[in-house]
Amino acid sequence: MNRYRGVRTAVIVGAGIAGLTAATALARAGWQVEIAEVGPPKAPSGWGLCLTGPSLRALDEVGLADACLAEGYGMSTITHVDVDGEPAGEARLPRLIGARRPAMVGIGRPVVHRILLAEARRCGAVVRHGVTVTAVDHERELVRVRLSDGTVRQVALLVGADGIRSAVRSLLGLKASLDFHGQRVWRALVPRPRWATGIHQFAGKADTAGLVPLSDRQAYVFLTENRVERSVLPDAALAPRLRQLLEGFPGRVEEIRSLVAESASVVRRPVLTALLEGAWNRGNGVVIGDAAHAPAPQMASGAALAVEDGLVLARELARHESVERGLHAFVSRRAKRCRTLVETSVAIAGLEQARRHHEAYPLADSCHRLMAEPA
């Protein structure tokens, strides 16, 4: 038995999708896992996300796909609508977990968090809230991790799953620029219209809008606002401004716009991307998920990459003689796939701003099919 397998201890920073999936996969492989999450124990607030086929395939590997399908809304199609409100095509995504199960699922972010957290704990992972990492030192085959409460851990593995503004990434000396793409994404929870049985995307004269079902009763509206500066609006101004932005769309968007009036939950976020150049690891420390590769939301596949990262990380560590070699193999295996998705999402953002939707749709479809290939 090689040395690190005798002390298979890990600290994971961040209890998001990437961190919780990695915790489950590592704990199942016999690792002692502790998660440091700076946020409170309460489930994170949030609107919704789409777990595409690669997400479901990875979650199915750990037995969680059906739980997500049971609590979300299964779908297999993306309907595109042009600036005149007329159908512009329909993309049927590959069903990666069997012909009788959907290609993807819309689901509330807090629901995903609850499912993943419960499984990580069931597998033995310990979750500590209100703490994060403040210092990292490499000591031969171990990593010395200081937490914000003053305690210290000496572990065989440090995983930074702490998002696009990752503290672990900085502490490991890894650099990634955060790129703003002149867009803001708006989201609002609304009642699901009966006709919304898949994702709908609407091309506008200035912006792009859409609707994603989350359950039989609920959906979320999204709007991508183009050519904007980074700015702040008071919460009370968000819903009226979103309704105003939706005014320019014909057809069914008028119905969606009326539903926003019923929503007390509207957010807007800048479209930011990040991509690590070169290594994602240093010594026995590594970053995964958005800390390593944060795509624009246009491909709805950030969650897929995060879930895959957690599973592939555990798999490669089990195959190699040392943690460091396992991390090198993990990065080598993941880098091209993740780069392709990030770069495609940025290209689609650019096409949207140029109003070249007829080019954006096939590009997205081809990337979904590329992502359908094994991770």
Image (cartoon, helix red, strand yellow):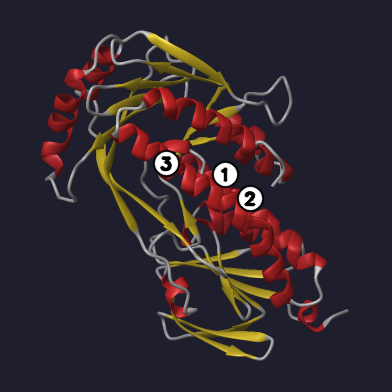
* Secondary structure of residue under mark 2: helix
- Residue at 15 percent of width and 43 percent of height: 235
Residue tagged 2: 308
Which numbered mark, 3 or 2, is in the foreground of this view?
3
Left-right relation of 31 to 225? right
Left-right relation of 93 to 25? left
Give the farthest residue toward the bottom: 139
Can you give x and y, in whole percent of width and height, for residue 321 in the image?
81, 76
Can you give x and y, in whole percent of width and height, for residue 326 in the image?
73, 70
Left-right relation of 181 to 58? left
Residue 367's mark?
A: none
Residue tagged 1: 304
Say which of 243 and 297 sits in front.
Answer: 297
Q: Amino acid at mark 3?
A: Ala
Q: Amino acid at mark 1?
A: Ala
Residue 347's mark?
A: 3
Viewer can see residue 148: yes
* Secondary structure of residue under mark 3: helix
- Residue at 13 percent of width and 45 percent of height: 233
Say which of 333 and 154 sits in front.
Answer: 333
Can you give x and y, in whole percent of width and height, for residue 223 in the image?
29, 31
